[in-house]
Image (cartoon, rainbow, N blue to C red):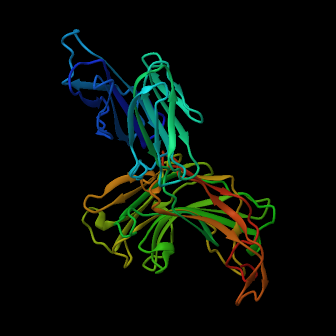
Amino acid sequence: MTTSSAYDIIIVYTMEALDLQSSCTFSVSDTAGLSWTARTAVVFGNNGRDQLQEFYAKSSSALSSDTITESISGCVSTQYGGEYNGFMAFGVSGTSFNSPFDPNISLPGTASGNSNTPTKSVSTTNANDMIIGAARLGGLTSGSGFTRIVYADGTNDLTEYKIVSSAVTNLAVAFSGNTGYWEEIAAALQAPVPGILSTSYNYAGYEVYTNGNQNGVVPLVATYFYQPVPTYPPGGCADFYTCNFATWVGLQDTWNQSDGKLAQAGTWADWVNASCAASYFAWYGVVGGNPQFVKCTGSNNVIVNGADKIFAYAENEAAYGGQSNYYDFEVYDYQSNTSCISTQNSLNMNTPHFADYVQENSKECFIDCASLASFATAHFFSAQLYSGLNPPVDTFIYQYTTQGFYYAFNMTNAPCTAGCGGQKTCGTYVTNVSTGAVDPSSSFDETWQTSYYTPTYNSQNC
């Protein structure tokens, strides 16, 4: 089997027909070394002579020519010199990786009988489930509203699926075929749990955590991105025609940096006047500590150009047994082969809980403050966080975002209609930067929409 995505759920249905023993024991293995779990007990039909069982495994990386093997024991029909067996296998992408199955007590559902319409009714707890069914019977076709996935032995063994937009009650997972003995298994894979959607006046991106209590230890964050290219937006720029944005990763111990503490590193892009060229630099800092902001210069200078591949990380030194109030940073440009590295930056934030991946309209003020520069897309990829300590465990963020362990921010602003500079009254908000979904490769996009009503720091804006 070859798959195109990481974090797939691999489903296998094992089958045995016309044996004369009282039971069969199935097992599944593969050359990729996945861990296989029986999702159901054996379903018997044809007076115990036919069997069907469901197995699954989680694959944290894409599979390439993985050989899956079904093994059986205890059901050799020596009277006839053997038995009929086989299996069906397929991968499902985009499920909740850590908790892939709908928790409804009716699931998985199993049934057997003698007719031409194998059917099992199931109910789900969640919306947006993928209902799957597998059946054994001659001449099978998928039921109404279902789509065939894979079949074996002609059409004697068949799997099907249907996506439902809301929770269902007693949904018939049905097939049709020749009249005869049949067995069926019905199950439901649940969609990723949505996280918390929010907005910010000056940034867009993700804050990812590792458990439902938001108290897991996250001592290191890292990502790759392609340096976004700034351009002069249609509405112009404030503060002597200056626009900017920063692209960075960070660590914090409270949601939305509510305690004012943040360790961060990344790149900065400026655009001054419509006829000027973009300028870039790398930087790092510890907000609430020392130093708060450092531009990488001298031996630490990073030569950054638009569209360069950038790697950035921030680390609490306790990750590998160091002091918990020290933070280390690196920003590396692959095209120029230059990097900025800094260690032992002091910040009284001993236990970070959130990993940040951000596109920001940074605060850069003289008389006014710089507006948001326009850009096509900020593409983050292979975004990672490390959990635990000494050593921490490296995990791509898709594992956590599929469980809903994240805040996703869009950048939004509005004009001030009254009370500007004090208790402001705002007009209609616009989305300046929208945050895309994290895909199975732990990649996502930040997409510029408009720079209107930025920056939020200027008194005339809300």
Does residue 296 appear left or right of residue 386 in this picture? right
The residue located at (50%, 54%) in the rendering is 126
For the question of whether residue 342 can be seen, the reply is: no
126 and 176: which is toward the camera? 176
Q: Residue 296, position in %: x, y?
A: 50, 64
Q: Is residue 390 left or right of residue 184?
A: left
- In the image, residue 78 sits, relative to residue 7, either above or below, namely above
Q: What percent of the width, then of the height, locates residue 363? A: 62, 74
Quarter of the image holding residue 3? top left
Task: Name the residue located 48 percent from the left edge and 24 percent from the top edge.
Answer: 116
In the depicted view, which residue is nearer to us: 75 or 305? 75
Q: Is residue 385 above or below residue 34?
A: below
- All told, the count of numbered labels is 0
Q: Front-most of 340 and 449?
A: 449
Q: In the figure, is residue 184 to the left or right of 334?
A: left
The residue lying toward the viewer, choosing from 298 and 329, is 329
Q: Quadrant of the N terminus?
A: top left
Q: Residue at x 39, y 77 (%)?
A: 347
Residue at 47% x, 51% y: name it: 124
x%, y% of residue 351? 34, 72
Determine whether 136 is above or below 453 in the image: above
Q: Split into 4 quadrants, where in the image is the C terminus?
A: bottom right
Which percent across, then down, holds residue 373? Answer: 70, 63
Check the image and report above or below for 46 versus 132.
Answer: above
Would you say 20 lies left or right of 300 here?
A: left
Residue 125 is at least partly visible in this image: yes
